[in-house]
Amino acid sequence: MTGSYKQKLLVIGKSKTPRCFKNVKNLTVDYKSNKKAWMTGDIFSDWLKEWDKQLAKEKRHILLTVDNYLAHPPVETEFIKLVFLPPNTTSLLQPMDQGRYY
């Protein structure tokens, strides 16, 4: 393991078929939509289960840390171990919440 694996980015927008995708044949991201363009429990669960299927094909196990946001429900997966951050620690543990951008 080198730590170089990168999962396809999940983008959430408001429109089901944004005009900017009109002539795009292959998206390099996974795109989902809802009225507020927010992460929901259903989007998170579906995305995680699809990723788990991909990891199963590669026989790859990963550990994923997530904050305890309501849209991150516990999901049973075989190849992804979810570790939830303790409540009220996101701003202490995540660099983006500390105003540090690398």
Image: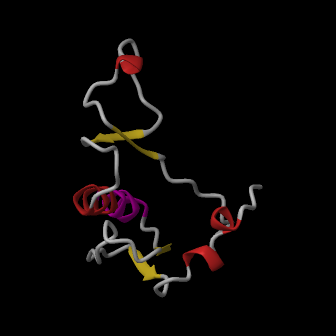
Residue in view at x 42 percent, y 67 percent: 59
Q: Is residue 31 above or below residue 3?
A: above
Q: Residue at x 42, y 30 (%)?
A: 27
Left or right: residue 38 versus residue 27 is left
**Residue 77 in the image: above or below residue 25:** below
Picture coordinates of residue 94, whole percent (x, y)? 63, 71
Q: Quadrant of the N terminus?
A: bottom right
| Residue closest to the eye, 43 or 37 | 37
Left or right: residue 35 versus residue 93 is left
Residue 34 in the image: state x and y as whole percent.
25, 43
Residue found at the far top of this picture: 23
Q: Is residue 81 above or below residue 52?
A: below
- The picture quadrant where one finds residue 32 is top left
Residue 56 in magenta? Answer: yes
Q: Position of residue 3 (x, y in %)?
A: 66, 65
Q: Quadrant of residue 46?
A: bottom left
Name the quarter where the C terminus is drawn. Answer: bottom right
**Residue at the location (40% across, 62% down)?**
55
Q: How many marks?
A: 0
* Numbered range of the magenta stretch: 50-58
Q: Position of residue 62 (x, y in %)?
A: 48, 72
Q: Is residue 90 magenta?
A: no
The image quarter in which residue 33 lies: top left
The image's colour scheme reads secondary structure
Main secondary structure type of the part rendered in magenta? helix
Looking at the image, residue 21 lies above or below residue 100: above
